[in-house]
Amino acid sequence: MNLGVIFAVLDTDSNKQIDFVEFKKKIRALHMRMEDDEIASIFRSMDTNNDGYIAYNELVEMFSGINTAQIIRKMQKVII
Ligand SMILES: [Ca+2]
Ligand SMILES: [Ca+2]
């Protein structure tokens, strides 16, 4: 697993921050059945410093906290 790759994929405009629009697009690409407000609440929980963007260190924090094997597998299907 390479979080740098995942971050780069989520950060579609490569400005080193994942904004909500980018995040939502990728969630939709994964065909996860989530409402906008659910996606928003996930986004907020990842954005630990509440600046409206997910930075790489925030992504790392989230992935270190939970078992993400399944999410990673799903994401790899979309990425590769
Ligand atoms: Ca971005
Ligand atoms: Ca942030």
Image (tube, rainbow, N blue to C red):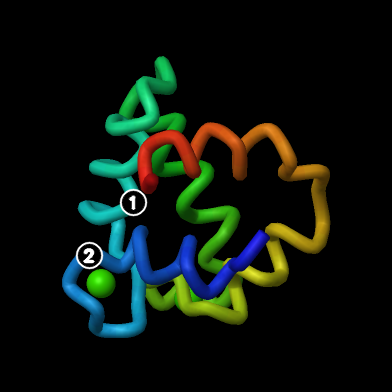
Task: Name the quadrant containing residue 20.
Answer: bottom left
Query: Disc 1 marks which amino acid?
Result: Phe
Label 2 CB-ligand 1 distance < 8 A: yes
Task: Tell me the quadrant of the picture where the C terminus can be found.
Answer: top left
Q: Crowding at label 1, few (<14), some or many (≥20) Cα neighbours within 10 Å?
A: many
Does 6 sit left or right of 59 as displayed?
Answer: left
Say whether marks 1 and 2 touch (CB < 8 Å). Answer: no
Cα gap from disc 1 to disc 2, whole angstroms: 9 Å
Residue, x 24% and y 78% (percent of image)?
14
Q: Which residue is label 1 attached to?
A: 23
Up-down: is 10 above or below 39? below
Helix, strand or loop at label 2? It is loop
In this view, the residue in front, 4 or 51, is 4
Name which residue lies at 71% across and 58% down.
63
The residue at which mark 2 appears reads as 12
Residue 1 screen position, x and y as percent: 67, 59
